[in-house]
């Protein structure tokens, strides 16, 4: 293990410590200060060992100096470390926050800022009743009450602090991974990937949810699954792999959507179905993350896409690719009845791409399900078939906003 990898592993532990002490203000302050001080030493150690790194100056310029030149969060992390070492603690404040979620975008939330005493003194029944009274019945049926502890540094007001720290760790992890590849190897396996210690996985934010139509408090969780080493791909997938390997490397959003559309088509033909899949890509169109999910209701979809936005931000994703089956509904009574009660008029398989520039690409098929024993099949919509088109792709909007923020051109 290289010395900078060992220090990065130490930093991962400090980030974990920050999450574990999120509701302990004094210890959270101590761990945050230590994280910021340690984070700077990762690149210091790399610089100290530059004599052992071939073509060091060009690599460091392209992988560290240039990407961080106008990076808001990395500039803050550097300045915050100087504040901690030379002036004392960061100025931070914490709040307890209640919000009613009933859409994909946080700008539409109903927000109530409260003190800890007020929050503990209010029963969940009262909070839910108030929310239900404020919302039309059709919307309340899909809404969620969110209770959240939030730390913010005064010098980084636009970012929740634990995600700012996770972003800094993810960028240092990227640098060390790049250096390992530059040296002809791989990053040591004992160094945690950012997604294994993100606030959703570790429950660092201590966010709790209650669906207004269901009793009980819950939380959103993410789990990692190792690939099955005994899996043997069937012949159609092996043929697909050979076909994709022969294609040129993707150079834009349309390319990755086209490749995924081909994969989705082969997968559906093979299995007669397709699970939801979300992938993130960097600015060079290299895949940097992948996940799946299972939605129980519309409220789950709101929560998932909000969390996907958080993940896209700290990974500094540039583009997303979403593949899923979806119901097509008659929205004539939208706003008056819950979505799940709107009449079904069809079923789609869709591949949707979007990037930080605001560009969108989509490929859609009708799913036809004949009576057994005929297998389900895909049908390309006719050019004049309005039901074969996607309208506003609202669920990707919070992720696009997060990617745009992560790629803001100038530090403020």
Image: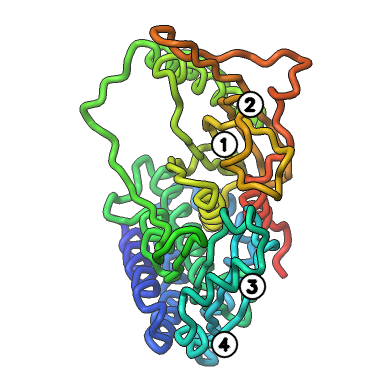
Image x and y of residue 357, in percent: 73, 45
Q: Which residue is mark 4?
A: 91
Q: Position of residue 149 (x, y in %)?
A: 49, 76
Density class for disc 1 (Cα within 10 Å; few <14, some 14-19, many ≥20) is: many
Say which quadrant the C terminus sits in: bottom right
Residue drawn at x 59%, y 61% as measured from the top left: 101
Of helix, strand and loop, which one carries label 1?
A: strand
Task: State how far apart marks 3 and 4 are (Cα).
Answer: 24 Å
Q: Residue at x 51, y 79 (%)?
A: 81
Q: CA distance from mark 4 to mark 2?
A: 55 Å
Q: Name the secondary structure under disc 2.
A: strand
Comparing labels 4 and 1, the label whose residue is closer to the camera: 1
- Residue 90, visible in the rendered structure: yes
Determine the CA span between mark 4 and mark 1. 38 Å
> Which of pointers 3 and 4 indicates the residue nearer the eye?
3
Residue identified by numbered label 1: 321
Measuring from the top left, give residue 157's x and y in whole percent: 64, 76
**Alpha-carbon neighbours of circle 3 within 10 Å: few (<14), some, or many (≥20)?**
some
Question: Which mark is first along the chain, 2 or 3?
Answer: 3
Residue picked out by circle 2: 345
Going from the N terminus, do you reach mark 3 or mark 4 first?
4
| CB under 8 Å between discs 3 and 2 | no
Residue nearer the viewer, 61 or 362? 362
Q: Which mark is residue 277?
A: none
Q: Which residue is mark 3?
A: 111
> Is 229 drawn above or below residue 372 in the view shown?
below
């Amino acid at each position: 293990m290289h010395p900078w990898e060992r220090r990065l592993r130490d930093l991962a532990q400090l980030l974990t410590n920050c999450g574990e002490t999120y509701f302990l203000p004094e210890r959270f302050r101590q761990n945050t200060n230590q994280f910021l001080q340690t984070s700077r030493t990762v690149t210091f150690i790399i610089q100290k060992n530059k004599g052992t790194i071939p073509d060091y100056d060009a690599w460091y310029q392209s992988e560290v100096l240039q990407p961080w030149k106008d990076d808001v969060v990395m500039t803050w992390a550097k300045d915050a470390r100087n504040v901690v070492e030379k002036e004392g603690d960061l100025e931070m404040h914490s709040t307890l926050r209640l919000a009613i979620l009933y859409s994909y975008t946080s700008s539409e939330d109903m927000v109530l800022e409260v003190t800890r005493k007020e929050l503990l003194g209010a029963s969940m029944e009262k909070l839910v009743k108030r929310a239900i009274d404020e919302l039309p019945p059709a919307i309340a049926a899909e809404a969620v009450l969110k209770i959240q502890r939030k730390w913010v540094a005064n010098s980084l007001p636009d970012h929740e602090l634990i995600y700012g720290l996770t972003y800094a760790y993810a960028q240092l992890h990227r640098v060390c991974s790049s250096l390992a590849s530059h040296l002809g190897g791989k990053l040591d396996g004992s160094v945690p990937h950012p997604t294994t210690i993100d606030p959703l996985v570790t429950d660092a934010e201590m966010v709790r949810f209650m669906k207004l139509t269901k009793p009980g408090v819950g939380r959103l969780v993410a789990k990692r699954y190792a690939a099955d080493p005994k899996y043997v791909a069937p012949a159609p997938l092996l043929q697909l792999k050979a076909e994709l390997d022969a294609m040129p490397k993707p150079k834009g959003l349309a390319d990755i959507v086209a490749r995924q559309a081909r994969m989705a088509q082969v997968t559906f033909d093979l299995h007669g179905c397709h699970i939801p899949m979300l992938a993130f890509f960097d600015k060079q169109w290299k895949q940097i993350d992948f996940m799946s999910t299972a939605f129980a209701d519309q409220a789950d979809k709101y929560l998932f896409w909000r969390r996907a936005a958080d993940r896209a931000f700290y990974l500094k994703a540039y583009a997303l690719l979403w593949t899923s089956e979806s119901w097509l509904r008659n929205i004539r009574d939208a706003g008056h009845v819950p979505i799940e009660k709107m009449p079904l008029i069809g079923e789609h398989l869709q591949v949707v791409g979007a990037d930080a520039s605001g560009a969108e690409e989509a490929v859609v098929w009708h799913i036809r399900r004949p009576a057994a024993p005929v297998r389900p099949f895909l049908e390309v919509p006719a050019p004049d078939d309005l039901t074969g088109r996607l309208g506003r792709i609202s669920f990707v909007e919070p992720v696009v906003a997060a990617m745009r923020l992560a790629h803001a051109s100038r530090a403020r």
